[in-house]
Image: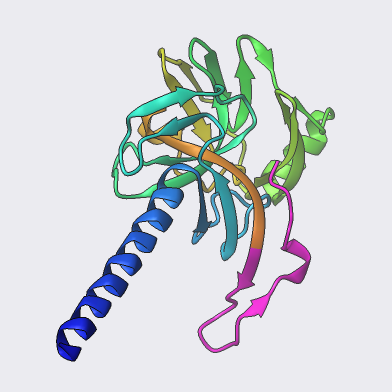
Amino acid sequence: MVKQTKKKSLLSEAISLGLCIIIILAVKSSIICNYTVPTGSMIPTILPGDKLIVNKMAYNLRIPFTEVTLWEFSNPERGEIFIFDSPEDSSMTMIKRIIGLPGDELEVVDGIITVNKEPLTISVSNPNELFDILTEGGTYEETIGKVKHKVQRLPHYPREDSKRWTIPTDHYFAMGDNRDNSSDSRFWGVVHKSKVWGKANFLYFSIDWPTYSQWPKVRWNRIGKELI
């Protein structure tokens, strides 16, 4: 009798634990989740080692563990930082900035963006100053939609080749803030809305891993930083 009662107790605890795990995974799947960023494609806004919180209900509510939408709350907007499945590999989650919305006509010339024939405003108006940033490396501010953010440029000789896209219905054009070192829609195409999982909100932790021979350092000044 004692053994039987003990077995029932263990079974009950196992079921309770299993339900807790399922609930936690369901919440992370459809409501809110944390991610760690391993690459530098969003420098200087997001650094490798940043840990961030993503609101998965920013745009819609989905049945957990599926792409089935129960309710749509809003549409992604230009300038927002969003999380999505890579069009090249659905097992890979990516983070970029939304540059183009459905129906937009985009032109990109050496990282300089024009949307619907209107160039995005950047903080550098002097052509010579922009030339110096492109050839020597540096940053400037870019305004897209309601968002003003920094763009990282790596040293290179300015290119004049132009690429154009018309964004299809239910698709988004994504680019990294590290404009010359980002694998994004310029190379692998647009992102379908069914592959968009949420909007990045803020950083809850950040660790700098300098080299394998050095101890990691906590970036205290980045904790709680809002992502815009």
Give left or right: position of 4 versus 227. left
User: Front-most of 69 and 198?
Assistant: 69
Q: Residue at x 45, y 17 (%)?
A: 165
The C terminus lies in quadrant = top right
Give left or right: position of 72 versus 144. left
Q: Residue at x 84, y 29 (%)?
A: 126
Q: Residue at x 68, y 75 (%)?
A: 218
The N terminus lies in quadrant = bottom left
Q: Quadrant of residue 219?
A: bottom right
Please state the extent of the stretch shown in magenta in the rendering.
Answer: 205-228
* Whole-percent x, y for residue 45 in the image: 67, 49
User: Front-most of 94 and 189?
Assistant: 94
User: Would residue 190 be visible to someone looking at this image?
Assistant: no
- Where 185 sits versus 132, above or below? above
* Whole-percent x, y for residue 16 in the image: 34, 66
- Where 53 sits versus 110, above or below? below
**Number of callouts:** 0
Which secondary structure is most common in the magenta stretch?
loop
Q: Residue at x 56, y 30 (%)?
A: 98
- Where 58 sits versus 205, above or below? above
* Whole-percent x, y for residue 8 in the image: 21, 76
- Where 16 sits versus 170, above or below? below
Q: Quadrant of residue 52?
A: bottom right
Magenta-drawn stretch contains 118: no
Q: Quadrant of residue 114?
A: top right
